[in-house]
Amino acid sequence: MPGKQPNLFAFNDIDALAPALRSYIIACQNSGLTRHDVFKVAVSGGSLPNTLAEALLAEPKSEEDVIKFDKWELFFADERAVPLDHEDSNYALVKKELLDKIPASMGQPIVHPIDAEYLNDTQELADQYEKKLVGSFAKGDSVKLPIFDLLLLGSGPDGHTCSLFPGHPLLRETDAWVAPIEDSPKPPPRRITLTLPVVTHAVRIAFVATGAAKKEIMKEIFEVGNGLPCALVNEAAGDRCSWFTDNAAVEGVQFPRRSFL
Ligand SMILES: O=C(O)[C@H](O)[C@@H](O)[C@H](O)[C@H](O)COP(=O)(O)O
């Protein structure tokens, strides 16, 4: 693997993982605030929003241990082409698991969901979402790619991340920031996703992967690579990429663990 290796952190369980994920997010938040007085973060769906809620809604342990939601701009790393109140919507999931549970005293992030007006046309849906990013990151001559302060991602059992699936032509997209997909092997089939160059250009990328069902794919991602989307992110991002896992997900995976300090 060229460059520095990704950080692999393994914890006994999600309850042990959550406080570490929280510290990591706070460090990313604080450097975003130092850089541009805002924290630009994108999240995926799946099991992640639930773990995020456990991490972010915990009682602060010190004066530095503060989540400043009112400084957050929250985007979606991928989204399904369904209405925002649909049970398949990542927005609905994040709202239910996290946003609705944030106490008023913690402030609220600015949230950027997809524009449901364009659900019938995934290319337009992706273009319109890209426009939101352009508005926030100022795409132009000097800005070729948006630089998120942090991407919070999951890994599927086939090694996909966002809605970037193994062997899919979308992995070769180099121009668009956001792309449509009509044939996602994970239902529902119609989605939009950040493209690989956008993912790998983030300042920091954190994967959360837990449970024994992830063991085989984690071996493949970390030991073989095989062009799997998660492995491509590891290779391109090196130590800007951190994996928050539980022991069950990485049992037998031959890759050095880092201890989380
Ligand atoms: O919309 C989606 O389907 C997700 O964004 C997807 O990329 C997810 O993050 C992974 O499939 C991992 O999901 P789990 O955490 O549930 O395994």
Image (spheres, rainbow, N blue to C red):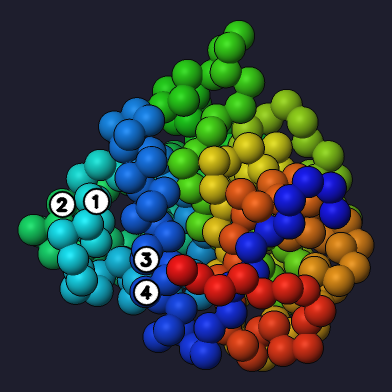
Q: Nearer the viewer, residue 114 or 231?
A: 231
Q: Is residue 49 visible?
A: no
Front: mark 2 or 4: 4
Q: Tell me, yes or no, whether the two marked residues, 4 and 3, touch with CB atoms within 8 Å.
A: yes
Residue 183 relative to residue 178: left or right: right
Q: Which residue is mark 2?
A: 107
**Quarter the N terminus occupies:** bottom right
Residue type indicated by callout 3: Arg
Q: Which residue is mark 3?
A: 22
Mark 4 nearby-residue class (10 Å; few <14, some 14–19, many ≥20): some
Among the two numbered marks 3 and 1 on one chain, the one whose residue lies closer to the N terminus: 3
Mark 3 to mark 1 CA distance (whole Å): 13 Å
Q: Residue at x 10, y 59 (%)?
A: 104
Q: Tell me, yes or no, whether the two marked residues, 2 and 1, touch with CB atoms within 8 Å.
A: yes
Q: Which residue is mark 1?
A: 69
Q: Tell me, yes or no, whether the two marked residues, 3 and 1, touch with CB atoms within 8 Å.
A: no
Among the two numbered marks 1 and 4 on one chain, the one whose residue lies closer to the N terminus: 4
Residue type indicated by callout 1: Phe
Residue 76's x, y, as percent?
48, 49
Name the element at disc 3. Answer: helix
Name the element at disc 2. Answer: loop
Residue 68 relative to residue 148: left or right: left
Mark 2 to mark 4 CA distance (whole Å): 20 Å
Among the two numbered marks 2 and 3 on one chain, the one whose residue lies closer to the N terminus: 3
Residue type indicated by callout 2: Gly
Mark 2 to mark 3 CA distance (whole Å): 17 Å
Q: Which residue is mark 4?
A: 19
